[in-house]
Image (tube, helix red, strand yellow):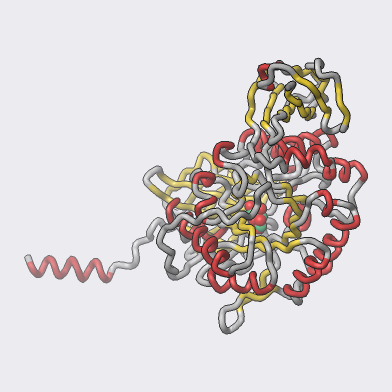
């Protein structure tokens, strides 16, 4: 018996490490011409079975659909957020210690640009465990009493961003009047990071030769500087993340004069396996930022999972993404704004649902569609982060971004996010109570042809309307008017004043 047992133990010890869910993990793709735009693939297995996602430049982070894993091969569908373009089948296969992936991408979500890619050289992220803090709930710190407003580099520049461009953007935020309209944060998203020094301190890459000088430049223009990092070892675009250096990075950011941090889960997903661990990873940076003593707005980006609105404030967050990445087309924008805009009940002064940055001015939508985008974000009390090149804006884009009446609704101090109060086919009515007792009402036409949309006093929750303002036109209309013709994909925004 004893002989049998020791033989069994010897066998067990000698056996090669089990092919432990061999496909599971976070797989990073080096940038290559083999499959441009492919960044990362994640696969994990829990009691509910396998799940995974693929991150690309074109689609952001997209969940795998119809995922089937057999042996060393995973088959799944990748959806692109555009109903005109069907999901495409992908395959991932273990090839020794590497992962080979084949799939199709609709580049830029454009029908004519279907590209088939194969990447053979993904490597698995493997890192030692760094400790997480004990759970605490941080008290509100008074930052972000209204949704943060500013500009972010990602939607327009992706990782191709540099010091000179950021300075020029800051200059144009001032000269265009956007700063004075409220857009204060100049946020450098992914792509600024270089390597760590011998003592572990994060350094910017060669495109950002002097981050403190850049912060000073931005500050002297009455603006604030934002940066981006990840709780994982790599950011979504493959740059250095804060894993294992959380407190050190927070101190570095504060010393540089940073006023805003977007913290994007990315490769952290392969390390923090449960919702509780992800929360602690976010809490760790929240505490680290607080410990610096510098007021730093903290933007959580874990794509709206695990009811983030219920814990985002408690980890020190001032805004939290409610969704995967936006794209510059109506279908993607509408899918987020109408349906992935977060739990209204969890948002308010100090902590906001973030349906992602604006695409207005990037060219992929019509003017009516961009007006809908801005109207929706204002109704949702969403952070307004410009995602365009403000150095080259058309007058129409400026008009959409600078409308004082629309911004006033977004920034209303009551901070109550709108709710959909009626949906009738393609017609939707959303309402938002405002601090002065008036009501913002938005009429949306999600169809492609113009139609009349009307509201009732009941919709508005008012017994009588004293004053009715067409917010985009900036002029009062008759307080008894109830119906407007709304163009396809268009919106009407009204501000209704209660009769005394
Ligand atoms: C993720 C985020 C985006 C952007 C990119 C940068 O996809 O959701 O908003 O920050 O990473 O790589």
Residue at screen point 74% across, 57% down: 185
Give the residue displayed 70% in from the left and 22% down from the top: 426
Q: Is residue 498 above or below residue 168?
A: above
Is 2 situated left or right of 194 in this image? left
| Image-based side of 404 in relation to 98, left or right | right
Q: Residue furthest front?
A: 500
- Residue 253 can be seen, yes or no: yes
The quadrant in which the N terminus is found is: bottom left
Q: In this picture, is 458 found above or below 276?
A: above
The reply, left or right, for residue 92 in relation to residue 418 is: left
Question: Foreground: 471 or 422?
Answer: 471
Q: Quadrant of ligand 1?
A: bottom right
Q: Position of residue 227 (x, y in %)?
A: 68, 63
Indicate the position of residue 409 as horizontal and vertical percent values.
74, 38
Outermost residue, bottom side: 198
In x, y percent, where is residue 326? 69, 45
Answer above or below: position of 373 versus 201. above
Q: Residue at x 69, y 20 (%)?
A: 462
* Nearest to the observer: residue 43 or residue 317: 317
Q: Is residue 316 above or below residue 494?
A: below
Q: Is residue 489 visible?
A: no
Q: Residue at x 66, y 42 (%)?
A: 80
State the quadrant of the C terminus. top right
Q: Quadrant of residue 237?
A: bottom right
Could you say which is closer to the camera, residue 233 or residue 304?
Answer: 304
Q: Residue farthest to the left?
A: 1
Horizontal relation, residue 283 to residue 487: left or right: left
Image spot of residue 452 (x, y percent):
79, 17
């Amino acid at each position: 018996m004893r002989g049998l047992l020791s033989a069994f133990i010897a066998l067990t010890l000698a056996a090669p490490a089990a092919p432990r869910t061999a496909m599971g993990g976070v797989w990073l793709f080096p940038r290559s011409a083999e499959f441009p735009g492919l960044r990362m693939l994640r696969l994990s297995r829990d009691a509910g079975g396998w799940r995974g996602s693929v991150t690309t430049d074109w689609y952001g982070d997209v969940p795998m659909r119809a995922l089937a894993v057999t042996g060393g091969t995973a088959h799944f569908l990748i959806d692109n957020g555009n109903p005109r373009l069907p999901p495409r089948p992908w395959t991932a296969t273990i090839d020794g210690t590497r992962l080979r992936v084949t799939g199709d991408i609709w580049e830029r979500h454009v029908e004519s640009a279907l590209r088939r890619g194969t990447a053979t050289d993904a490597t698995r992220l493997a890192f030692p465990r760094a400790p997480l803090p004990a759970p605490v709930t941080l008290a509100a710190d008074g930052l972000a009493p209204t949704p943060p407003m500013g500009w972010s580099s990602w939607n327009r520049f992706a990782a191709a961003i540099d010091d000179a461009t950021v300075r020029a953007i800051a200059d144009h935020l001032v000269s265009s009047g956007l700063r004075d309209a409220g857009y204060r944060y100049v946020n450098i998203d992914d792509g600024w990071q270089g390597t760590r020094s011998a003592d572990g301190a994060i350094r910017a890459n060669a495109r950002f030769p002097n981050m403190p000088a850049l912060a000073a430049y931005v500050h002297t223009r009455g603006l604030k500087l934002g940066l981006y990092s990840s709780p994982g070892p790599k950011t979504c675009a493959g740059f250095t993340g804060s894993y294992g250096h959380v407190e050190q990075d927070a101190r570095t950011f504060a010393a540089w004069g940073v006023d805003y941090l977007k913290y994007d889960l990315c490769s952290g997903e392969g390390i923090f396996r449960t919702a509780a661990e992800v929360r602690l990873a976010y809490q760790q940076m929240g505490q680290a930022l607080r410990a610096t003593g510098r007021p730093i707005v903290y933007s959580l980006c874990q794509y709206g999972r695990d009811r983030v609105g219920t814990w985002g404030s408690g980890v020190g967050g001032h805004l939290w993404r409610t969704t995967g990445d936006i794209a510059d087309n109506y279908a993607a924008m509408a899918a987020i704004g109408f349906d992935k805009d977060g739990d209204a009940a969890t948002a308010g002064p100090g902590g906001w649902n973030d349906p992602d940055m604006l695409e207005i001015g990037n060219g992929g939508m019509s003017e009516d569609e961009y007006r809908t985008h801005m109207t929706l974000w204002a109704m949702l009390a969403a952070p307004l982060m410009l995602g365009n090149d403000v150095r080259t804006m058309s007058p129409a884009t400026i008009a959409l971004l600078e409308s004082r009446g629309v911004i006033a609704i977004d920034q209303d101090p009551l901070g109550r996010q709108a709710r959909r109060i009626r949906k009738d086919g393609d017609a939707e009515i959303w309402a938002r109570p405002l601090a002065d007792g008036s009501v913002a009402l938005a009429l949306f036409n999600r169809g492609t042809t113009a139609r009349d949309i009307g509201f009732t006093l009941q919709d508005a929750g008012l017994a009588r309307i004293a004053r009715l303002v067409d917010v985009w036109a900036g002029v009062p209309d008759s307080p008894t008017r109830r119906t407007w013709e709304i163009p396809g994909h268009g919106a009407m925004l009204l501000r209704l004043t209660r009769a005394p």
